[in-house]
Amino acid sequence: MKPRQIFQIFGIPVRVDGSWVLIFFTYIWIISTVYLPGFTPGLSRWLYFVFGTLTTILFFTSILLHELAHSLVARREGIRIHHITLYLFGGIARLNREPSTPKGEFLIAVAGPAASLGLGGCFLLVELGTASSHTVPLLQPIFHHLGWINIILGGFNLFPAFPLDGGRILRAFLWFRTGHHTNATNVTLTLSKWVGWGSLGCGVATWTSAPQFALSSLFFGVLLLSFLATVKPTESTALPLTPAPPESHLAAPPAKWFATTFVSLEPETPVSEVEVLRKQFPTCQSCPVIHNQRLYGLLNLKALPLNGSTTGTTPVREFMEPVQESFFVDSRSPLHQWEAAALRNGFGAIAVLDADGLVVGFVNLEQIRLYLTEK
């Protein structure tokens, strides 16, 4: 069943998958007929059902807050959020692009588990406050359950395997150490597959001696490998792990070469204003779309339709190509990576980012090759 939007929060559409409905009502049934009666027996069946429904709503609200934490931090990094979708085993925040820096990757990845662990701690504190309450005896088991389930959710997501948040934290660390997003992604994917198969092997090996542990290990392995099956390794066409030596003519050029004035646009700039830009810079083929010095995408000026009122007020973000890895380079990377990226992205130009992921330059193939010739 196709996911359906149910509401918006902070301008972000929230959708539910068909599988979510199944687990939602299953969760209500388990809490109402097994957990709450076992914790506090002798109460009305309808009371169990009402508080079981409340517990389930709070649990899925916790999952939503986990994904919302990812989304709000991503928005601060200049990344647009398409939507949040709740699935059978949790939720996914769909971003329009990957973070442009290891720091951004780390902050976005760690935000979700931090929210879950924080919620877990808050629920357990509330449980302490309701421990002596006899007015509503079901409050303590509800907050006890919500506290520990959020802590388990946060801890599980910190496991260093992609695409869990811990895997993204690992990728951010490798990206920071090597300077290359592609290699960090592929190494993380490979390690994650070994973790998945290792979990399956551990489950098989302990099936007779520790069946409960074995079942959990098998479930985790199957779940992780099924997630990984939907993730394709990133192509690594021109991003070697070892940069060129400083004495090479391919080493990173000095900042004064690329940190010159260049044409750029804001994401909300109306298309009608681009015609003025074309007349001022007739040889300009493309330009970066930037907000607060963060790269949002690249815009092909020659291919942009300008047909009067039908598109005149439309913001350029609707026509730009959202940022991809080949749209930018680190200012400290060797020059042959600049040339390879400009060739690969189809624009013949690239944005240059500093160590904080801010745009400090924009150069085209002709400029790169001229610089190489001069050197």
Image (cartoon, helix red, strand yellow):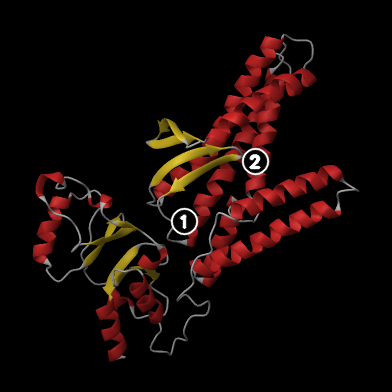
| Precedes in sequence: disc 1 or disc 2 | 1
**From this viewpoint, which residue is outermost toward the front?**
1
- Residue at image coords 38%, 77%: 340
* Residue found at x 71% / y 25%: 30
Residue 308, horizontal then vertical, whole percent = 9, 48
Q: Which residue is mark 2?
A: 153
**CB under 8 Å between callouts 1 and 2?**
no
- Name the residue nearer the viewer: 245 or 54: 54
Q: How many marks?
A: 2
Tell me residue 265's x, y (percent): 22, 57
Q: In the displayed structure, would residue 273 be above or below residue 240? A: above
Q: Is residue 250 visible?
A: yes
In the displayed structure, would residue 229 be above or below residue 25? below
Q: Quadrant of residue 332?
A: bottom left
Q: Nearer the viewer, residue 374 or 236?
A: 236
Find residue 117 and report its horizontal and vertical position in percent. 62, 40
> Which labelled disc corresponds to residue 117?
none
Within 10 Å of the Cα at label 1, are there few (<14), some (14-19), or many (20+) other Cα atoms? many
